[in-house]
Every structure is written in C-alpha cells, then in structure tokens.
Amino acid sequence: MSNERTPLISSGVCGLSVTAVACGGSPDATPESSSETPSKSPRELNTFFGVMVPTILSMFSIVLFLRTGFVVGHAGLLQGLLMVFVAYIIISLTILSICAISTNGAVQGGGAYYMISRSLGPEFGGSIGLMFFLAKVFACGEYVLGLVEALLDVFGSDPESSVSQGIRVLPQGYWYTVLYSSVVLLLCLIVCLVGAHIYSRTAFVILLVVTVSLLSIFISSVAVKPRDFVISHPGPGNQTLRYNASYTGFSAATLRNNLGSGYSLDYSTNTVMSFATVFAIMFTSCTGIMAGANMSGELKNPSVSIPKGTIVAVFYTFTVYVLLFILVSATCDRTLLIQDYGFLQRINIWPPFVTVGIFCASLSAAMCAMIGASRILHALALDQLFGIPLAPAAITSRSGNPWVAVLYTWGLAQCVVFAGQLNAVAGLVTVFYLLAFAAVDLACLALEWASAPNFRPTFQLFSWHTCLLGILSCLVMMFVINPVYSSASIVLLLLLLLFLHYRSPTSSWGYISQALIFHQVRKYLLMLDVRKDHVKFWRPQVLLMVANPRSSCQLILFVNQLKKGGLYVLGHVQLGDLDSLPADPVQQQYNFWLSLVDKLGVKAFVDLTLSPSVRQGTQHLLRITGLGGMKPNMLILGFYDSCTPEDFFLQDSAFCDSSMGQSSEGEYNFGVDLPSLQAHFPPVRHVESPRWVSPEEYVGIISDAVKMNKNVCLARYFFQLEGEDRDSKVDGSDRTIDVWPLNLLQPGSRDYENVCSLFLLQMACVLNMSSKWRHARMRIFLNVETESSDQGWVVNEEEFRELLRKLRIRAAIKIVPWDAVVQHHTQPETPEQTRALSDGFLAAVNAMIMEHSSQAAVRFLYLPRPPAHHSLSQQYVTQLEAVTSGLGPTLLIHGVTPVTYTGL
C-alpha cells in the first residue's frame, strides 16, 4: 500500500492530461514508469477552459442529439421535464458534495476515486473507484454505439433507411455494428495512446462545433417549413414497418398532444419503454459532472474554479435541455420523435450541421470516457489496492501516459460494444454512476458528521442534509431504474469492500472511520456513568504491567482470553526523569508497542509512562489509564522469582520469518517494520543481570493496588503455556482449570464465600467462557480437616454446591483432606501479619497442590493480603515462591470488589 506521496496522474480536460504528478512529492518517484517522468506542469487553466468546457462536453454527449426526441416521445413533455428536474436535483446535490470535498484540499488524478479514497480510506475508495472505472468503461461503449448508430443513419446501405440523404455504402446488421464499433474504439485507442494531449487541446474547438450545431437546431425550428416523412423499420420476419410522421413547426396542437406520456415499443431493442428505462437513458447525459473536479491539479485557483465552473456548466446544460425538450415537443409529432432517433437531421436547414455535431459530441465523449477510465485505473494501480491483476496498469510511457491502463480500458470497452445497441447498456451505466455519486455524497456526509477541525472547505453551500438527501435520491433512483442491476452493483461493491478489508491495505491517507469512531466513542463515553455501575454487569478491566514483551508474550496472549470483552491495557514504565532529558522518550515508543499488539493479534490498548521508579509509574498508570467508566479494575503483574526468562521472539515463527525480510510487500507499517520491532525491545534479562524492581518495591506495588481498590493478580510460569496464539486451533477440550479458593497460607480460614474467594471463582468462570477455554473442565478444590472433631465441612460442602448452582458455575468439586499439611503449621503467638510460616508447611502445601493439580493447564490460587510493613516484603515473596514452585501456569489472585450476583 502506498503512502501519502503516492504518484498519481493529474487530470487534464475530462481527465486527459498525461502528466505524472506525485501527490505532495516529485514525479520521479514512480518506479513503474519505463523512464523518467516529466516535471509537474504549472497551474495554468482558468475556470472556463479548465472546468466549464470539459463538464459541458461530458454532459452533452449523445443524449443531446440522439435521444432528446426519444425521451420526449415516450415520456411526453411533462414527464420528460420531470426526469430532467429529478436528474439535475440528484447531480446538484452531488455537486455540492464535490465542491465541498474538492475545496478542502488539492484533488489529484483519479477524480471520484481520489476524493473517496482519501476521504473514506482504501476500502471504500478502492471499491468505489473500481465501480466508477467500470461506469466509465460502459459509458465509453455506449458513446461508441451512439456514434455508430448516427453513422448508419447517414451512410447505411439499407434502402428502407429513415434518412433519405447521404451516400449509403455501409452494410447494416448486428455484426456490422460490432465491427464499426470496434473500428471506432480502435481510433479512440490510437488517439489515447498517441495524441491524447492533442485531443485535450482541441476540446474547446469541439465545444464550438457542438454549439454551432445547437444553434442550427434552434434556428431551423423557425426557418424550416412543415413537412411529412415516411419512416420504415425492419419488422418480424422479412416485413418492413412504415410510419407516417410529420414536422409541424410551432403548433399548439402538437404541443398539447405531446404533453402526456406515450410509452411504446423501442424499435432498436424491441422492448416496451417505461419511465424507468427512459430515465436511465436520459440520465447518461448527467454523468459528466466530475470532469471539472478532475482538473484541480491544473487550475490556477481550484477552490474558486471548481464550484463556479461546475455550477455554471450544469445550469447551462440544464437550460439547453429544457429549451430543447420544449422545442421538439412543440414542433414534431410523437411518431417522428419515437421512430427516428436522428430526426434532428431531417428538420435542420442543413443536415450536416447536426451530423457533424453528433460525430463530435459522441467521439469526444467516448475518448473522454476512455482516457478518464484509464486514469482512474492507473491511480488504482499506483495505490496497489488490488495487487498483481492491476499492477501492469501502473506502467507509463516516457511522457507519463499510462498506456497499459489505456489498453485495459480498451479491452473492456470492446466487450461492451457486443451489446449492439445504445439503449441496452444505458441502464447499467446509469446505475454505476448513481452508485458513484452516492459514494461521493457519503464521503462528504462522513466528513461533516466527523466534525474534524481540518474539514474546512471554502465552499460552504452544503450541509449534512444535502449529503443525506443526495445519497437517498441516488439509491432510490437506482432501484427505480433497474432493481436487478442495482442489487448486483451493490453486491459487487460489498464483495470488493470485503476483499479490500481482508486484504488489509493500510495507508497514511487518514481514515474517516477513525474520525467517526472517535466522535461516537466520545459521545458514548460521556454516557457511560460510573455511578450507574451494577455488579451484575461487572467485567474485568485489566492493566497488565509488562517489563519486556520478549519474555511476556504468552502472558499477554493469555490475559487477552481473560478480559471477557473488557478493557485491556498493556502498561510499561520507562525509568527516567523528564527534567534531565531533552524530550519525552515514551512518545517515540508507542508505534513499536502498537505494532507488537497488531502482531500478537490481541485487543489491547497501550499506555506508557516515564517515572523515576516502577512503583511510582504503576501508581500513575493505575490512576490515569482509561477514561470515564472505562478504567482498569484489575492489576496483573508477572511473578517475582529467579527464573531465567525465555525469549518468545526467538520461538515464534512469525517473528523469526518476518524479521528475515518476508513481510508483506507494499504493506504500510506506520514506520515500524519487523526488524525494527525486534531491535527496539532489549534482550531478555540474564540471571546475573540486576533487577529493576526490589522485593520491597514489588510488594509495595501490590499494596498500592489494594489500597486503590484494585484487584491484583500475580502470574507465574506462563511461558510454559501453549496454544494461546491466534493461529492456534485449541478449544480447551483437553484442558483443565483448577481453582483453590481457600487461603492456603491460613489453615484456620474456612470462608469460601468471602469477596476474594468469590473473585477467584468469577475469574476462573470468565476464562472458561473464552474461545480457547470454553470446553475446558473446571475443578474446584475444597480443603477440609477430616480428622477434626468439627464435621461442619460436610455442611459447608453442600452450601458451596448450592452457591455454585446459584452462580451458574459448572464445575466439579473435589474434597482434599489436608490434615497432614496443617500439622506442619505452627501457632506462635506473634501477630498473623508478621508470622513466618515454616518451610515444611510451605513445602507441604506445594506438594498437595502438585499432587492434585499437576495436569492442570492453569491454576487459580488465593493471594493473601500483602504485609503492611515493608520489612516483611522479602518474607511474603519467599512464601509465595515456595507455594507455587514448579506448579506450571498459575494465577495468584486477591480480589477486593464484589463481582458475583445471584439475582436477575
């Protein structure tokens, strides 16, 4: 995926310029070019030549001369004007969005694709860009078919042709139409490959020719006297159908007869017309509104020229269409309008005026569509969204002309002309364009709703209401025109979206989704009121302190299973004092940690801090991590022992292979490649290496968390846990979760229902509900003194079973007699907090757990409250180390908040 300096092709007239321009950089950064690319062309086009001329030419196309009578004849003047108004309302709403987006920054080559991709991100941009490319390809084929239709009207050899003048030398028929269309397409291809820049310079001359043709039509309505015609068409079999038609000149009776609709059989496709099919054909005249927006890279003042030029061009074409509709409905009877597409030649003072106008408008529109489509395809190829299939389209000639993209476009347009009739492809063209227009409105709507401070378009005549109305009107008209085409195009769009999403192209263009998510998250965070918290909706929100990810990856992956949809934050304390440093070193580390999160596939945030000590830094994170109702309620620490850490980076094949250069080609990695990620995190600690944390500070961290009403978990031996990575297929069916809810260091305690014990049960249940542990067996061990005179443990067992039933916890209860263990426990008269447990008792507890839980995948043990005095910290750590020695993955948990609920 390319970055923001991706070279794109700056559009010329109708997207015709072939100069390669880097987006924010020099053009010589295009590696795909066969040679050096020229320097960036100066901004020299004004509003008229840069915006109005290409937009007017694109909007006149073939409908102006070849389908005006068709629309009025079938729909009548009133419905015809309604179609014009509806079409121009839709494009006017889209124009407002185009003007807003195009005046919020420079638009490079690719037109709609560039605007949508840079506004909505690569998924939407790539999928809509490809759809817009297909729309232009189909439009190119449609314009070529229209040109061939006009050629055959004049030069067709059929003696029954509806045109009585001309040299009839061209044979007619379906395959002849395809042949002539192929020849015209070949001419367009040659022009696009050899002389596209020459054509772009003659656009104004073409507009003059079309204007003269238009003037001749209006003059002829006054100068030409009424006349009658006989129009013939081949009918079923070998029959010839003849129709009597007349040109009446301006007549109130003719106007009155043409006011209503008269939908009938279309002689070219032999299908009965309707409002939807006629509107689809008429709307193809409105698809050129983006021609001016494509010119922003060449305009002297794009923020002024694009809105002004586009709006003036649309108003001018709207006026011409309305006047022409009224003119033909007042001067020609319905038979003439329906049965002869080229009737304007019949009623002209000099028919070649119209003929030349048709040829110029159609050929101009076809070449404009071909060149514009090739530029969109070239931009898609440069952005590497679709990989190898479009990679050759990035190749350009010495002059910067994307000739391979032109060949792609020509080949697809050649397939379109096999439709044989202009009317047959008009519906698909209209549906594709309406979908592209809806996407532009969506882009503008998303930018407006995101309320980003940098969205400050100089064009202000829009709002989210106009964007939303534009989207709805486009979608409604799509399904009115053709529900099948509309559904198929939307399905294709969704498939492209899914393809690009799972291909995961990343870019530095900026994602509108991020802005919208921020806007919504802020709103909902304000609604997340901590005063309304209830225990039945409690979930773990974890702060996991990580010293070095190289030795902690297995624990990071395990805690990702333990969070149960709650907040998960990786915390790290960088030792140092900001007063003695020139800049904050923490800010530069975030990308490395976020890349690590991506690589491990965990759903976690990252929070780093700078502090003179780990204890102070942990206090900072416990206080300030999170926002509003999303703050950690649990602190997880690695265990303080003498084990030699293992380097997970050297064990995981993904890290090793990728660090050898096998990363995804073209993937944008936010400035962090895997070799850099490997180098950033220091090697794991050696046995002789000094520790960053003393036992007193470690226990102080636990004590601080308890004082701040945070639950605490200590994790030991999790480097031995396997099957937690995202590629693992483990479902827990061969795993066991063992829970020891009693405080094993205080044999006199028999309370299985205190807050800490219930917290243990809740966390074990949460783990049992996660994807990789849902089929694991859970066992709960109840320690009892069977030889004691007090046999209350039998009653306690029944009460405990009833408690598990109320808590909906499915687990097997194991009764573990520990009379032999308790015998090693001495009862000195010293206070409990300062009491030193004998090594024999600790060893006996460890042996008991080992005997019953040696095969467990993970063990949950009761973590006693840390001592109040720091002088006992070493003793506290030593006792915990002795009890858990050699057990395997173990969690020592001290809960301080109620988390279970038996009601509804």
Image (cartoon, rainbow, N blue to C red):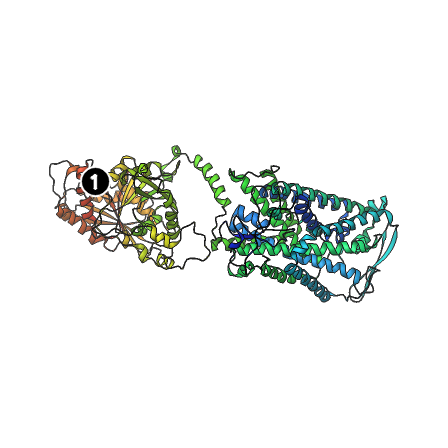
Q: Hey, what amino acid is under mark 1?
A: Glu
Q: Position of residue 208 (x, y in %)?
A: 75, 50
Provide the secondary structure element on which disc 1 rests: helix
Whether residue 804 is visible here, answered yes or no, is no
- Residue extending furthest toward the top: 531
User: Which residue is painted at 77% across and 55% down in the image?
Assistant: 356
Left or right: 523 in relation to 295: left
Left or right: 292 in relation to 551: right
Q: Residues within 10 Å of mark 1 (few under 14, many from 20)?
A: some
- Nearer to the camera, 576 or 66: 576
Left or right: 250 in relation to 43: right
Whether residue 24 is visible here, answered yes or no, is yes
- Nearer to the camera, 469 or 805: 469
* Residue labelled with disc 1: 696
Residue 339, quarter of picture: bottom right
Q: Number of labelled discs?
A: 1
Residue 646, quarter of picture: bottom left
Q: Position of residue 50 (x, y in %)?
A: 65, 47
On-image quarter of the C terminus:
top left
Q: Position of residue 498 (x, y in %)?
A: 51, 54
Q: Position of residue 1 (x, y in %)?
A: 48, 54
- Nearer to the camera, 492 or 874: 874
Left or right: 26 in relation to 164: left
